[in-house]
Amino acid sequence: MKRKSENTDGILEQFAKIKEKHPDALLLFRIGDTYQSFKEDAVKASTILDIETREKMVDGKEVRSVEFPHHAIDTYLPKLVRAGMRIVICEQLEKPQEIEKEKSQSTNEADMPRKKKEQAAQEEPVKSVKADKPAEEKKTEVKTETKSEQGQEAKAERKPREPQMVTVNGDKVTHGHAYQSKTNPEDWYFTAKINGEQLKPQKMDSSDLAAYQKKEMTVLQLMERYYPTKLMQRVPDVAFQVANVVSGPEQRPLTVDKFNVYKEKDEQRPDFGRYKFYAEVDGQKMSTVASRQDLNAYFDRVKTPGELVEKNFGERLHLPSHYQQFRLPEGVEASAVRIAKDRSDNKWKVSADLGEHGRTDKKEISFDDGFALFKTKTASREQIAAKYLGEDIKTMLNGPVMSMEKSQSMKM
């Protein structure tokens, strides 16, 4: 965009006129060795590019502006485009009067002898000849300027890649694809970008790869499989700024005073180098190794500290919510469960009699589970059995029925 030949429009007037033509675009003005943006566009650019705005005097008025060196355009322009912005770049050209003057002076020096001979034969003043350019030269100049401006607008208006999906949080997922490992060709990985940020590649299951190659599995399904927490609804930030409360034994509220993640640095510990959760709840200080799923839930802000405490420290705090997740398979009665102290080692153990399906092995229960069962009453016998014997019971119920041969009694 160039200024009018009379040079009556200031920067802010040009900004307003161009903004009227392109209301949905962000305007960048080339001024000297910098690109600058003003008013509401400056605020948008500042947020996306992480550049501070400042109050600046422009055309005698104080306005909010943001600027960066002209040589940084190749770095900042892609960031603006990836953020979904439509950009209009306004380049500052030379004044038409100065271009006219320079060309006229050059012509005078080259054609001085010829012009002296023609001057006497001309009836009109020489200045009227200088005032207008030849039609062909003007046409060429306009055509060149138009092509240059069109090229700049085309480059600025280049749209970013359309998202393959948009999450419930409004995040745009692009570049979702599977690729083969260069070091081990048998391994394939799935990856994607969210809002332009590359996600850590995840090794694919062979069945998922086959389904994806046959187009039987979509990017959405792969995202649900390998990046589930990226698609979940984020909880409000306030949940991480104030103390959470969980329901303890007898519905007594327990306050989560502190919750964070750290990496174990003690080389003498068996969990050295692993990421752990640390919590302070109702005066108790606790830590435990964090699962990958729970770490993702924490960093992606899809679970509150209270929810993570219930899941990772529920047994230690004897929370009712911890035991509500455990249920015996249908058909197994509470009377089948036996919890007793084993005389051989004096430890409390749980087992279940499944009748024709047999009896499970005895499993030792932890001190905290025993405390929840006998002291706080936050756990039932069925819940303890489901927690320790759940998988064994399912396997036995789905297996063959044991043959029970009754021996005939003999009377003496």
Image (spheres, helix red, strand yellow):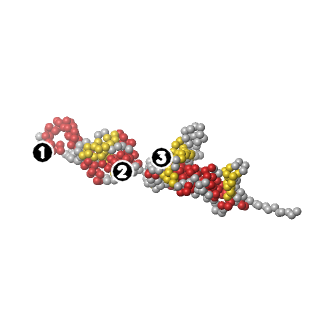
Q: Which residue of the protein is positioned furthest toward the right in this rendering? A: 412
Chain-order first, disc 1 or disc 2 = 2
Amino acid type at image mark 2: Arg
Residue 1 in percent (x, y) is at 28, 47
- Name the residue carrying label 2: 86
Name the spot of residue 124 as percent of width and height, x first.
12, 45
Task: Decide which of 390, 251 is in the foreground and name it.
Answer: 251
**Residue 365 visible somewhere in the drawing:** yes
Work out whether mark 3 precedes mark 2 in sequence or the reverse, and give the earlier one.
2
154 and 262: which is toward the camera: 262
User: Relative to 102, is 39 above or below?
Assistant: below
SS type, badge 2 = strand
Residue at image location 14% in from the left, 38% down from the top: 117
Q: CA distance from mark 1 to mark 2?
A: 51 Å
State the residue position of label 3.
198
Contact, CB < 8 Å: mark 1 with mark 3?
A: no
Label 3, label 2: how far apart the Cα atoms are: 23 Å
Type of the residue with mark 3: Gln
**In this rendering, is residue 50 above or below 331?**
above
Which image quadrant: the C terminus? Answer: bottom right
Left or right of 171 in this view: 6:
left
Tell me where residue 406 appears, x and y as whole percent.
79, 62
The circle drawn on residue 124 is 1
The label nearer to you, 1 versus 3, is 3
Whether pointer 1 and pointer 2 mark residues with C-beta atoms closer than 8 Å, the reply is: no
Does residue 305 appear left or right of residue 342 in this picture?
A: left
Q: CA distance from mark 1 to mark 3?
A: 71 Å
Left or right: 121 in relation to 256: left
Look at the numbered disc 1 and give the secondary structure of its residue: loop
Mark positioned earlier in the residue sequence (1 or 3): 1
Determine the residue positioned at 49% across, 48% down. Answer: 257
Say few, some or many: other residues with alpha carbon within 10 Å of mark 3 (under 14 / 14 to 19 / 20 or more): some
